[in-house]
Amino acid sequence: MWKNIDYDKCVSFINCHSQPAGGDVESAIRPAVTISRLTGAGGQTVADRLVEYLQTHVPAHCSWTIFDTNLMAKVLEDHHLSQEIAKHEPEDHKPLIQDQMEEFLGLHPSTWNVVQQTAETIWQLASMGYVILMSRGAAVVTASLKNVYHVRLVGSVERRTERVQEVYRLGPRAAAEFVKQHDKGRARYLKEHYHKDIEDPTLYDLVVNTDRNSYDDVARMVGDAVIHRFNLARPHFNTR
């Protein structure tokens, strides 16, 4: 079963970064990871285990933290938006005329504004470092940042559908439709707002098939790649 990402941990992370770091850790690069995934490819489980791995192998004055479903709450906080906006997920497709009419009526900001504000928050979090950012175009938004490692998780539709059945306790047909719609929504989000193909492998540093690799192996694979890429095994990074 996937864990719920704790919003209190995210608040603790933000508060931690408001305090100055001490020692050599402060001057070291502050890495971040983006995880893009097909629905049911185990993204949240891999992220959970990656946090544990990095927390052990890459000491930091702030805990490694995942931002996923909690990201919208952080956007609302950053931009002083109404909690009602959280009901309008940016990955949901809505006709332009309907979106503009609802904005005109004051029901919520335009989807474009929410996307822009979400991108600003993603950029800020990635710049802070020690974060794992999932979905909402994070790989594209942070593409120019030198401290970010980008991962894409894939798998067969059959295995991914089985996982969705297990996690959400859905029947085969409902699970298959769930996978189909969520995959389409994520691809559409990237195409409509960033003009990118979510399946383009050049957007990512590493693409991993979770059918063929266990979640623990994927977490270690990504963690070791991050450590190697940013030379985080340097002696000065040891906080003892």
Image (spheres, rainbow, N blue to C red):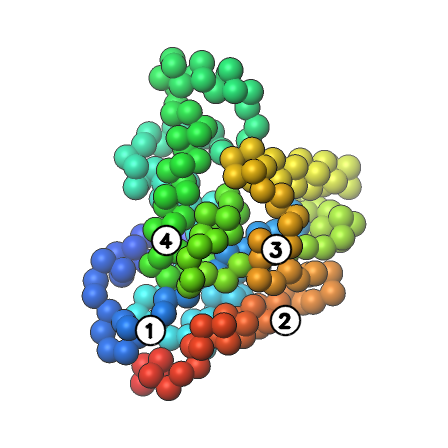
**Vertical comparison of 193 with 67: above or below:** above
- Picture coordinates of residue 103, whole percent (x, y): 40, 19
Residue visible at 42% across and 63% down in the picture: 147
Nearest to N terminus: mark 1 or mark 3? 1
Considering the numbered disc 1 on the image, is that residue within a helix, a strand or a loop?
loop
Q: Is residue 146 left or right of residue 91?
A: left
Residue visible at 78% across and 50% down in the picture: 158
Residue 28: give its label: 1
Nearest to N terminus: mark 3 or mark 4? 4
From the viewer's perspective, is the residue at label 3 or at label 4 nearer?
3
Considering the numbered disc 3 on the image, is that residue within a helix, a strand or a loop?
helix
Quadrant for the N terminus in the image: bottom right
Q: Which amino acid does label 3 sit on?
A: Thr
Quadrant for the C terminus in the image: bottom left
Q: How many marks?
A: 4
Residue 217: give its label: 2
Residue visible at 36% across and 70% down in the picture: 29
Residue behind mark 3 = 202
* Contact, mark 4 vs mark 1 (Cβ under 8 Å): no
Q: Measure the alpha-carbon separation of dots 2 and 1.
A: 27 Å
Residue visible at 36% across and 53% down in the picture: 125
Considering the numbered disc 4 on the image, is that residue within a helix, a strand or a loop?
helix
Nearest to N terminus: mark 2 or mark 1? 1
Q: Is residue 132 left or right of residue 36?
A: left
Nearest to N terminus: mark 2 or mark 4? 4
Q: Measure the alpha-carbon separation of dots 4 and 1.
A: 17 Å
Q: How crowded is mark 1: few (under 14 residues within 10 Å), some or many (20 or more)?
A: some
Q: Residues within 10 Å of mark 4 (few under 14, many from 20)?
A: many
**Vertical comparison of 72 with 62: above or below:** above
From the viewer's perspective, is the residue at label 2 or at label 1 nearer?
1
Q: In the rendered image, is residue 59 in sight?
A: yes
- Picture coordinates of residue 67, whole percent (x, y): 44, 52
